[in-house]
Amino acid sequence: MNDYTRLDAWINAHFDEQVAFLQQLIRVPTDTPPGNNAPHAERTAELLGAMGLPAAKHPVPAAEVHAAGLQSITNLIVRRRYGPGGKTIALNAHGDVVPPGDGWTHDPYGGEIADGKIYGRASAVSKCDFSTYAFAIRALEAVAKPEQGQIDLLLTYDEEFGGEVGPGWLLKHQLTAPDLMIAAGFSYQVITAHNGCLQLEVTVHGQMAHAAIPESGVDALQAAVKILNALYAQNTRYQAITSQVQGISHPYLNVGLIEGGTNTNVIPGRVSFKLDRRMIPEENAAEVEASLRELINRTAAGLPGIRVDIRRMLLAHSMQPLPGNQPLVDAIQQHGKAVFGEDIPALGTPLYTDVRLFCEVGIPGVIYGAGPRSVLESHAKRADERLDLADLRRATQVVARSLRDLLRQG
C-alpha cells in the first residue's frame, strides 16, 4: 500500500468526523451583510484546536472592518512547519457568505443530510473547504509525515466584499508568504484564471415635488430609467467581445439593487442603483471603469435638472495565471483523475475570488476544492445550497495527495 492509498484510507476512516465538523461550521451563521463573522472564527478555532490544529487568531481592527462595510472579522492561520527546505503552500477558504434568502426546504443553518448531500448556506461555498483542507492536512500528517516545507491554512472572512480585510489584510501585514496557494473551488476542474469585478453605486439626483404638480419637480426615477436603458444597451454590445480563456465567455453587467423615492404621491427626487460589471481577463479595469462613468455622465448630461454621483464600491482585478502555477495544476490533475476517474480540466471561471490577491503579489495560485461541476449545481447564493458528500470525500483525497507531492518537491 503506497502513500496515496493510505491517505485515501485515512480520509475514509475519518469521514464521519469530517462531516460532523462541517455541520458545526454551517450552524454558526456568517451572513454578509451584515458581516458579524468573528463569532464563527472563534468557534472554528475551538473545533480545530480540539483536532490538534491550533489556529492563530488575527482580529482586524474595527475601524478597518467598518470601513469595508462589515461588523467584525477575525482571520485564522493554522501554520504547520515540517522542516527546512521545501515549499510553503497556502490553503485559503472563506467563511463569509451571502444571507440565505427565501425558498429553502432545509434549514439554511442546519447542516442537514439528505440523499447523500449536506444542505446549508456555505455548504458548497466555501465552509466545505475549511473541512477539505483541515482533514487533508490531518491525513497528510498521519500518513505521509512530511519532513520539509510548510502549510498555511488561511481561514478568512471577506470574500463577499472583496477580500481586502480577509486574505488581502494577511498579505499586507506579512502574516503569510507562501510559494504556492490553493483556494476554495469545485472538484471537477482546476481554475487558473477568472473574471474581474467592478461594482459602482450610481445616485441620480432630481427635484422632489408633489405628484399633483409634477412639472414643479424633476423626476429622478425617469432619469434613472434612461441611464439604465443606456447601460443595458451597452450590456448587449458586450456579447460581441469574446475571451480567449476557456470557461469564460464575454463581459457583462447586472443591476442588482435599486432604491429611491419617498412615497407614492411624490415625484422622486433621488434614486440610486448598484451595478456589477464582470471583466474578462483581457480587459483593462481602469478603461472599463472610465468607459462606464463616461456613458452614465453623458446620458445624464442630456437630462435637464439631473445630476449624478458615481461611487466605486469594489474593484477586483481578474486573475491571470502565473507561470509558476504548473506544479499545482499537474498535481491536482494527476490525482483528480486517479480519484474521480476522469480528466480534470484546467480552465477559467466567470466568478471572481480571493486568489487574485495572491497572484497580484506574484504568488502562483489555483482554485480547487469540494463541490460539483458548476455553481448552478451547488445552488450557491440560492435556496437549498448543497454539497454531495461523495465530492467532499474525493476532493479531500485529491488535496491530501497533492500536498504530499508538492511538499516533497525542492
Image (cartoon, rainbow, N blue to C red):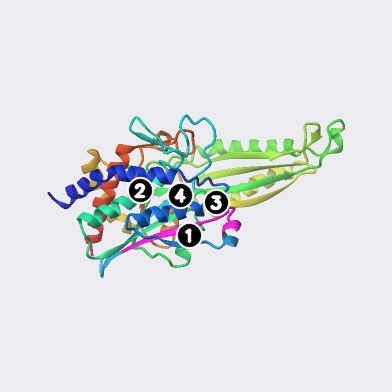
The residue segment tinted magenta is 65-80
Name the mark on residue 95: 4
Q: Position of residue 135 (x, y in %)?
A: 30, 50
Q: Which label's residue is closer to the chain start, 2 or 3?
A: 3
Residue in the image at 23% along x and 47% along y: 335
| Tag 1 near tag 2, CB within 8 Å | no
Q: Which label's residue is closer to the chain start, 4 or 1?
A: 4
The C terminus, quarter of image: bottom left
Q: CA distance from mark 1 to mark 2?
A: 22 Å
| Tag 3 near tag 4, CB within 8 Å | no
| Tag 2 near tag 4, CB within 8 Å | no
Q: CA distance from mark 3 to mark 1?
A: 18 Å
Q: Is residue 126 left or right of residue 333?
A: right
Packing grade of label 3 (10 A; few <14, some 14-19, many >=20) is some
**For the residue marked with disc 1, what is the amino acid?**
Gly
Q: CA distance from mark 2 to mark 4?
A: 11 Å
When the figure is inspected, residue 350 is found, relative to residue 47, above or below; the finding is above
Q: Is residue 47 left or right of residue 330?
A: right
Helix, strand or loop at label 2? It is helix
- Residue holding disc 2: 131
- Residue holding disc 1: 168
Q: Which label's residue is closer to the chain start, 1 or 2?
A: 2
**For the residue marked with disc 3, what is the amino acid?**
Asn
Name the mark nearer the viewer: 3 or 4: 3
Name the mark nearer the viewer: 4 or 1: 4
163 or 385, which lies in front? 385
